[in-house]
Amino acid sequence: MPRLFVAVFILIGIVLASCGTTTVQQRDAIDSVAESYVKLTLEIGLYDPDYVDAYSGPPEWRPAPLDSGSTNEFPREDLLRHADELLSRLDDVDTERLENLEQRRFRFLRTHIASARARIELVGGKSMSFDEESRALYDAVAPPCNVDTLEAVLRELERLVPGTGDLAGRVESYRARFVIPKDRIDTVFAAAIAEARSRTTHHIALPDGESFEGEYVTEAPWGAYNWYKGDLHSLIQVNTGLPFRISSPLGLACHEGYPGHHVQNVLVEKHMLRDQEWIEYSVQPLFCPQAILNEGGANYGIYIAFTEEERIAFARDVLYPLSGLNPSNADEYHRFEQLTNRLGGARVEAIRRYLDGVMTRDEAAKWLQRYALLSAERAERYIRFGEQYRSYIVTYSVGEELVRSYIEREAGSSKDPERRWELLHDLFAVPHIPSDLE
């Protein structure tokens, strides 16, 4: 009997050792694919200048710059073969041997390689509808735009912004009353981001040394941008060439800084790169599923950091006085912003119909003026943005609704604020893809 027990124990040990080795092999296989994915992404970025938004991996992995004296034809077939090879190598991984967190990593990596493959096809000339492109790149599709809903919002705005002339013109004049003078922008934005940071760090533990610097620019197609530099540091640029309204400072502070893009990137660097050593997180493509969660989480962050009453109070008591604007208008302007935000779907619909050939460029501009209440100049600027970034525009509205629905479903809109902070933290500290939130 003792010999039998010894034999059984030896056999169990051999089996367990074999299983352990097999699990390590699966992890090694994923690590190898992850490294190749980073290099593939950087290579795509050689030919697609907008593709790589940030990179903090080994400098030697960056490919040599293209020869300025040659045609530099896009190597579509080579890149597609590379992507297909990576997907095939992942298909050979036995995911049942992986822990839950590693399975999440697997799904994240596979979804992003498939997205990179779709981007290669698009840059290589493949035609996709707006929704097909959105699904392939971002793992999400914008819902149809309900024109009746837009009309109902416009009727409310007609009552809120009375006067003569068309509604778009009246709205533009109304907005102009809430523009912050340029010499006060820095003071106001600094107050907003300090408050947003204070509230965020009260709930989310950020690693020592995280920091950002602000910079003001005037020539850019966006209102603000977070350039993540790695090593827990961001450069946040704010475009003062566009009207900087009283609603901008707090929104941009939360979106670009706390608990938005800066916090997202810091958490990814801390948990994914440093703790887990998952190298795929060293590169951030602009056109990828993570963008939905990044933009959606950054948009929704303000609703987690501030209740509606707190947003109104902070604007009225702090931001309006610093801006030199009349605080007694805070409640009315907040209501105005709530209504105009409900017109966001009109922007996506205009670009979708224009890029799909359902509308001409001129018709899309008129649609934006009619339903998004953009001036002719702002409509033209938005169309140019859509022409350059195409279905990326769904990341804001669709991403925000996806994150909002997920967090409010899991924690309730206000019943458990601490749980809401936990969910937002885990959204960026644990691998997720958009379809996980549905």
Image (cartoon, helix red, strand yellow):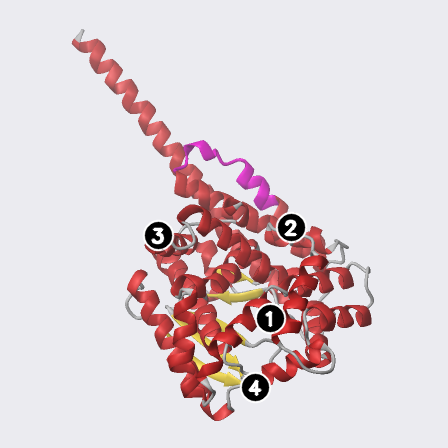
Q: Disc 3 and disc 2: Cα gap in Å? A: 32 Å
Residue 201 position in % (x across, y down)? 31, 66
Nearest-to-viewer mark from 1 and 4:
4
Residue 173 marker: none
The residue labelled by disc 4 is 177
Give the amino acid at mark 3. Answer: Asp
Horizontal side of 48 relative to 432 (left or right) equals: right
The residue labelled by disc 2 is 135
Q: Nearer the viewer, residue 148 or 95?
A: 148
Figure quadrant of residue 51: bottom right
User: Where the N terminus falls, by quadrant?
Assistant: top left
On whether residue 357 falls in the magenta region, the answer is no
Horizontal side of 387 relative to 265 (left or right) equals: right
At label 4, counting other C-alpha atoms closer than 10 Å, the crowd grade (few under 14, some 14-19, many 20 or more) is few
The residue labelled by disc 3 is 416
On whether residue 88 falls in the magenta region, the answer is yes
Residue 342: in sight, yes or no?
yes
Q: At 47% from the left edge and 93% from the top edge, which residue is drawn?
A: 183
Residue 386 position in % (x across, y down)? 69, 68
Give the amino acid at mark 2. Answer: Arg
Residue 70: in sight, yes or no?
no
Q: Disc 1 and disc 2: Cα gap in Å? A: 31 Å
In this picture, which residue range is highlighted in magenta? Answer: 85-99
The residue labelled by disc 1 is 65
